[in-house]
Amino acid sequence: MSMTISDNMETVYQKPATLTETPMHYCPGCGHGVVHRVLMEVIEEMGIAEQTIGVAPVGCSVFAYHYMNVDMQAAPHGRASAVATGVRRVLPEKYVYSYQGDGDLAAIGTGETIHTVNRGENILMVFVNNGIYGMTGGQMAPTSLCGMVTSTSPYGRDEHVMGHPLKITEMIAQLPGAYYVARHAVHTPTAVRKLKKAFKTSFEMQKQKKGTCFIEVVSNCPSGWKMTPVEANDWMEKNMFPYYPLGDIKVPATMK
Amino acid sequence: MSEIQHDETPKLMKGNEALAEASLRAGLQAYFGYPITPQSEILEYLAEKAPEHTEVVVLQAESEIAAINMVYGASGAGARVMTTSSSPGISLMQEGISYMAASELPCVIANVQRGGPGLGTIQPAQGDYFQATKGGGHGDYHMIVLAPSSVQEMADFVFDGFRLAEEYRMPAMILADGALGQMMEKVYLPKAGTLPKKETPWATVGKTASRERNYITSLHIESEKMETVNLHLQDTYRKLKQEVRCELTNTADADIFLVAFGLSARICNKVMDIARAKGINVGVIRPITLYPFPYDIIASFAGPAKMFLTVEMNAGQMVEDVRLAVNGKSPVYFKGRMGGMIPTPEEIMLEVEAMSEKQQNLNQSAGYL
């Protein structure tokens, strides 16, 4: 469908050029599309698209490189931050970000996550936490809440058997290499604006080679949670946010 | 193959150190590794030399898994990159190697083998032949596999490895062993600045306005597309056959062929001398590229009056390829030691003498003599 916009109309909002024309495969109501957009808006607005290399994970956002219009690499499951390390070390003046989900970053990639931050790699690590394995059909994630029903915890997550939901963001914030650590969401316009600011701050700090910036986005999974998008956001606010509270976790003195 | 230019004056070096120094002279841009015996000297050497080579990234990773994925990232960003390890560590890298092969990313990986399976032993072995040449990781892929048999080749094959890896856009493995890594020998090091680097227009270095974005992936969800990718890889492997290399010693008049790679081939050369002094015409076939394997060269020596003995430091791995090459035209025997034990010339000689006696009897009864 084509649409003609008359000459006297002003464009006030449009898709950033840093997103491709490819329709996203995400389920209705999923937060990934918004996180993608916010990240790519920041890259466009900062004018750094030509200096930016992204690393995509395995999981729901495995096709991120189809949507993000920058040079990208697709990492093996859990290894995005190691791949990003390789990129950033040989291109020390470029901007590098990794984009991972909870299974990728906080289960199979825990070792890479911790050591990447511990080295203070000058990258932005984007961590989208929706407490479930969406791509594989709704299995328990390291961040699934206690009592949460998933296809591999059909009677609810029993923390005595299956372990506790992992607050990996608080964990890595303890490391000296972590420079800026914050937890955000994309369920309201206000939350989106805050996330955008956090991404922008992260890239600014990356330019100054301050260390690892780590931004968690608590998100939803209407399909995996078996809820409507509205129900999912409501459930997220009531259940995910108390355990994974939003806000800054570690901020440099210059920002305080 | 292209000729490597060497220093005029030799040095006395350990195999691991010669490999490390050669990598710097080959224009290495990044090294990611993790300590494991018997190859830790490579990381140690590069770490020590790092201040003289500030343009080279040298990073000790938290694991071999992280190391190979750093190699993936750096190679995808267009850098000349290497990692090294020994058998158990190479096992950990298999996932990343499969991804790199699928994504057509060049790199050099050295495996200074030790005895296995499991944690095994730190003594030299050749038990990773199957893993190196037949895949190792998942899916239909291959690496270029170069098997050095001297400290000189530990150095030279870094140059050959990078050249071939970049030409064919695939990982190249140097399949050495603990003895080659640890022993000291005279080596004429390759000259620095003599290995040109191919352009990497596919690399992720930042999308410019003049081109579409580059992305590196091995995911092709449509099976038709995935098959196309596979067909392309297989096409590359077919082209790679022109790079096959094999050293032939005294094969023209040989009745018995010893087939061995790496350290085993050195021992076989000794056996050949002993056998020839006793009047047994032994020749040595040393595959240098284990992938692509010199099937045609070996096949050209097969015939009813000939015999083959494959000697390996494993339970019999390359012998399967020798049998494929010989294709029933000659008997193929095997002598191997495992678990870090190195076969002696004397015990191989016992096999050769037994074969020779059998050959005399067979040839007499068949009328060949």
Image (cartoon, coloured by chain):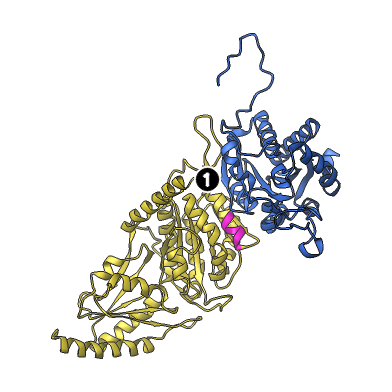
Chain colours: A blue, B yellow
- Spot occupied by residue B199 in the image (x, y as percentages of width and height): 44, 43
Q: Is residue B303 left or right of B244 when viewed as pictured?
A: left
Q: Quadrant of residue B353?
A: bottom left
User: Does A190 appear in magenta?
Assistant: no
Q: Nearer the viewer, residue B65 or A104?
A: A104
Q: Does A145 sit left or right of B316 as displayed?
A: right
Give the magenta part as a residue range. B64-69
Tell which subunit mark 1 falls on.
B
Residue pictured at 80% horizontal, 60% vertical: A158
Above or below: residue A15 compared with residue A187? above
* Above or below, B222 relative to B271: above
Q: Does B67 appear in magenta?
A: yes
The percent coordinates of residue B239 (x first, y second) are: 33, 53
Residue B42: x and y in percent read: 55, 65
**Residue B151 shows in the view:** yes
Q: Look at the magenta stretch and give its main secondary structure.
A: helix
Tell which of B164 and A146 is nearer to you.
A146
Q: Residue B95 location, x and y as percent?
A: 55, 59
Relative vertical location of residue A168 with respect to residue A232 in this rendering, above or below: below
State the residue at coordinates (50%, 46%).
B220
Q: Is residue B12 left or right of residue A151?
A: left
Q: How many marks?
A: 1
| Residue topped by disc 1 | B216
> Label 1: few (<14), some or many (≥20) within 10 Å?
many
Q: Is residue B163 left or right of residue A250?
A: left
- The residue at 54%/66% (across/down) is B90
Disc 1 residue type?
Ile
Asked whether A122 or B338 is in front, the reply is B338
